[in-house]
Amino acid sequence: MTPKTGSPSSVEEAPASTKKVDKKYYERELERLQVELVKQQEYIRAQGLKVVVIFEGRDAAGKGGAIQRITESLNPRAARVVALAAPTEREKSQWYFQRYVAHLPAAGEMVLFDRSWYNRAGVERVMGFATDEEYDEFLRSCPEFERMLVRSGITIIKYWFSVSDTEQEKRFQSRLKDPTKRWKLSPMDLEARNRWVDFSRAKDAMFVATDIPEAPWWVVEAEVKKRARLNVINHLLGQLPYDDLTPEAPELPPRPPQDDDYVRPPKESQHIIPDVVP
């Protein structure tokens, strides 16, 4: 029997952010968006813009996959990914932001941070790698640091990838079964798995202190990886309006005639890799 108008349905509709994405649509839309990313990059280069894109979020939230789809069609000379390892003893003695400053973009460049200076507000806070004084100073100084970067002409775009504990656990289990992804599960990731609520509190405090008008936080619903990738790319394109400056395809002149005096060395004199493909 059809339920009366206004009565609750017996089956609640799933939120849009949890719906799977049709594979053909995803591939077609991703290809379209990647073409737009190339146009945007050419505009950034031509205008001498300086862009920082920060990717933060829980382990296995999909940050790396999104970064990969954004950059795979871009010129790597002008779009760099920065994923720093744990600081050395020397770096620990430096001003906290110092090792990140070295990776900031020059004119015409976009730098994507796969985790960033916000490590102090997240993993360092929860795992006890930073003192209370260091943490408090970070929350005070980070907004001023970012305002200073913005005043210097750097655009800062910050994304937080949000995923549920159930979905994170599913992805952790998948990584355990996949030898090509097992390296992604570090002892730190496994410990963070046990501190879900602590990380939630740390994220909330970080947002309160650092969600500033000059560099606001944008939350990416990342329960479905493909949906999150399309959404974040679409949003990134909207954050930096651009004109299509794609150069016209040049005409290739006829190839010059080959030099009859050239003789290629025999293949037997070279180290040819075995052809193992059936």
Image (cartoon, rainbow, N blue to C red):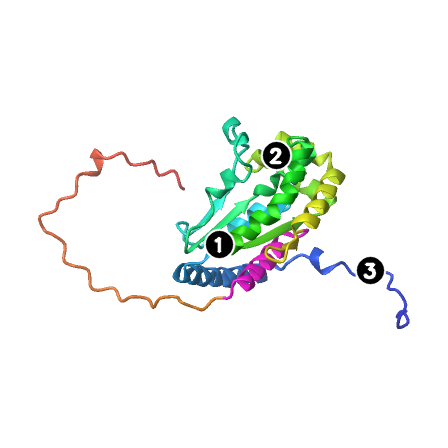
Q: Quadrant of the N terminus?
A: bottom right
- Disc nearer the start of the sequence (1/3): 3
Q: Which residue is mark 3?
A: 12
Q: Do the residues bearing badges 1 and 3 touch, measured as CB atoms within 8 Å? A: no
| Amino acid at dot 3 | Glu
Q: CA distance from mark 1 to mark 3?
A: 49 Å
Q: Which residue is mark 1?
A: 152
As measured in the structure, the alpha-carbon distance from the residue carrying label 3 to the one carrying label 2 is: 35 Å
Q: Is residue 60 visible?
A: no
Residue 211, disc? none
Mark 2 / mark 1, whichever is N-terminal: 1
Q: Which tag is nearer the camera, tag 1 or tag 3?
A: 1
Question: Could you classify mark 1 by the number of other residues whose Cα lies within 10 Å: few (under 14), some (14-19), or many (20 or more)?
Answer: few
Q: Residue at x 47, y 47 (%)?
A: 104
Total number of numbered discs in the rendering: 3
Packing grade of label 2 (10 A; few <14, some 14-19, many >=20) is some
Image height of 129 relative to 5, above or below: above
Question: Is residue 253 rendered to the left or right of residue 239?
Answer: left
The magenta stretch spans residue 226? yes
User: Is residue 95 in view from this perspective?
Assistant: yes
> Taken as a whole, is the magenta stretch helix, strand or loop?
helix
Give whichever of 19, 209 is nearer the camera.
209
Q: Position of residue 242 (x, y in %)?
A: 47, 66
Q: Which residues are magenta?
A: 223-241
